[in-house]
Image (tube, rainbow, N blue to C red):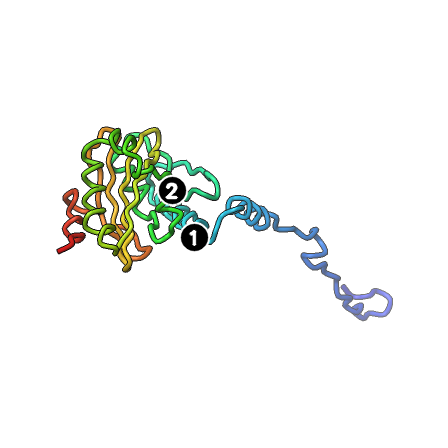
Amino acid sequence: MVNRISGNAPPVVPRSVESPSAQEPAKTNSSGSTAQAERSALFEGMSGGERAEMQRFMALKNSAESSGQTKSGVRNLGAATPLLFEAQAGESLQDRAKAQFADFDLTQMSNAQLNNLDERDPRVMERLPQSVQDSYQHYYDNAEANDWASVYLSKHQVGGDDVYMIATRTDGSDNYMELFDASGKPLASGEALEDDRRTWDSEFGACRARVIWD
């Protein structure tokens, strides 16, 4: 617009522009610190191996949920217990047991000894289903008695069901596991190397053929 008195256009005065930071109060990101605090509380009191086991199960849980599978609840059962999946409705005990123990790291002594039963007590052994006794005896006779492995007998909860476990930790990198329901029905057997995911046998007990003392 031309100045009517001088005939000249008035000088252009630049308009001040406020920066976004001046217009809005700074936002603080509290979600990251909250998540970190929750993780710290979850891992509190756990050893390094137990913490790694929990992280592994958390990764499996997140993977299952992102792929559209039924969500499973997760419970922190304390420092002496690895992360366990609760039973998923509609799945068989066999499937639930496989899912729960596929990444159960037997290289960790605390896992091998978890929920142990005293196999030295004849009264304990007599109450076990015959199939569980036979499994224990096979690994003991062929491995522990020949001083190249240790065999563990334990009973775990898979959802609301009891599951017997025979676990064998060798002096090498391999370890073996056999699972039975409360009546002694075979559920799964398999082998793992180090702390890798366990490979389940297509036929129950196939891994016993790899634990034979000649």
Q: Which mark is residue 131?
A: none
Q: Residue at x 76, y 63 (%)?
A: 1
Q: Quadrant of the C terminus?
A: bottom left
Q: Earlier in the sequence, mark 1 or mark 2?
A: 1
Q: In which image quadrant can residue 153 be found?
A: top left
Crowd rating for badge 1 (residues with CA inside 10 Å; few <14, some 14–19, many 20+)? some
Crowd rating for badge 2 (residues with CA inside 10 Å; few <14, some 14–19, many 20+)? some
Q: Which mark is residue 114?
A: 2
Q: Residue furthest right?
A: 5
Q: Is residue 27 visible?
A: yes
Image coords of residue 94 (percent x, y): 24, 36
What's the residue type where badge 1 is placed? Gly
Image coords of residue 54 (percent x, y): 43, 47
Q: Which mark is residue 49?
A: 1
Q: Secondary structure at mark 1?
A: helix
| C-alpha separation, residue under disc 1 versus residue under disc 2 | 13 Å
Q: In which image quadrant can residue 67 be found?
A: top left
